[in-house]
Image (tube, rainbow, N blue to C red):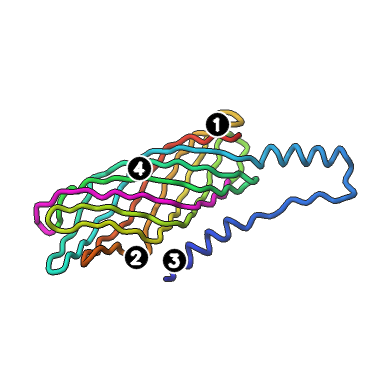
């Protein structure tokens, strides 16, 4: 619970966006300059990303039988739409991830895969530099729907609360387009349950993506 509270607090801090106010006695020139600056830093955007997904070992309890699953590196994809407000960004993201079972660490011969569909609301804090590179921090909350098939051991089809934390760096190709490199850790609050099976889901992902600001 402490882990979840810390993630929620961090997410709320990212969302605490200071407003920009313009005094009523400001001159027309100052108002025009402020409006131009606001238009330059406040804008909607869309993004796409893809990368490598490293799903951690999962302990699967299937009633009288249990085993630990090891997974091959898989792939992860995502699309998002959001709004940039100065140093801050907020977005809605839809993601997909798939990993194949490598082996059962308990010695049983096992095949199968685990797929995850994630729906997240993410916050970002951009760290301004005087170069084309912009480092950033990110955190998000949402839900993850996991579909796992493990040969003769367990089947999972369940949804749980999920969260993510990460960091990355963006390179501005021009005023509208940026190339994005990001590391993310995503986990679920509870293990997934379907019948008497209880697999775990947590993943370390590395993404390369593109972001376009309108």
Q: Residues within 10 Å of mark 4 (few under 14, many from 20)?
A: many
Q: Is residue 148 above or below residue 169?
A: below
- Horizontal side of residue 23 vs 141, given as left or right: right
N-term-proximal mark, 4 vs 1: 4
Q: Name the residue under label 1.
A: 177
Q: Is residue 14 above or below residue 47?
A: below
Tag nearer the camera, 2 or 1: 2
Q: Mark 2 points at which residue?
A: 190
Q: Quadrant of the C terminus?
A: top right
What x and y, as percent, mark residue 52?
33, 41
Q: What element carries label 2?
A: loop
Extreme residue in the left direction: 108
Q: What element carries label 3?
A: helix
N-term-proximal mark, 2 vs 1: 1
Q: Nearer the viewer, residue 196 or 113?
A: 196
N-term-proximal mark, 3 vs 4: 3
Q: Give the number of the disc on residue 4.
A: 3
Q: Mark 4 points at which residue?
A: 76
Q: Is mark 1 on a helix, strand or loop?
A: strand
């Amino acid at each position: 619970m402490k882990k979840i509270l810390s993630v929620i607090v961090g997410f709320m801090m990212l969302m605490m966006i200071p407003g920009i106010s313009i005094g009523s006695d400001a001159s027309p020139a100052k108002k025009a300059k402020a409006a131009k600056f606001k238009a330059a830093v406040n804008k909607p955007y869309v993004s796409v990303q893809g990368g490598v997904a490293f799903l951690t070992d999962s302990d699967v309890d299937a009633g009288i039988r249990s085993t630990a699953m090891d997974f091959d590196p898989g792939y992860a994809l995502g699309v998002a739409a959001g709004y940039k407000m100065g140093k801050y960004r907020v977005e809605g993201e839809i993601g997909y991830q798939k990993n194949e079972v490598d082996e059962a660490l308990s010695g049983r011969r096992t095949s199968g895969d685990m797929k995850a569909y994630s729906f997240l609301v993410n916050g970002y804090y951009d760290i301004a530099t005087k170069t084309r590179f912009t480092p950033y921090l990110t955190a998000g909350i949402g839900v993850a729907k996991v579909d796992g098939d493990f040969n003769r051991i367990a089947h999972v089809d369940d949804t749980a609360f999920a969260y993510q934390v990460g960091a990355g760096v963006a390179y501005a190709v021009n005023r509208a387009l940026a190339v994005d490199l990001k590391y993310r850790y995503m986990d679920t609050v509870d293990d997934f349950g379907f019948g008497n099976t209880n697999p775990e889901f947590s993943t370390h992902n590395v993404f390369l993506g593109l972001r376009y600001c309108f």
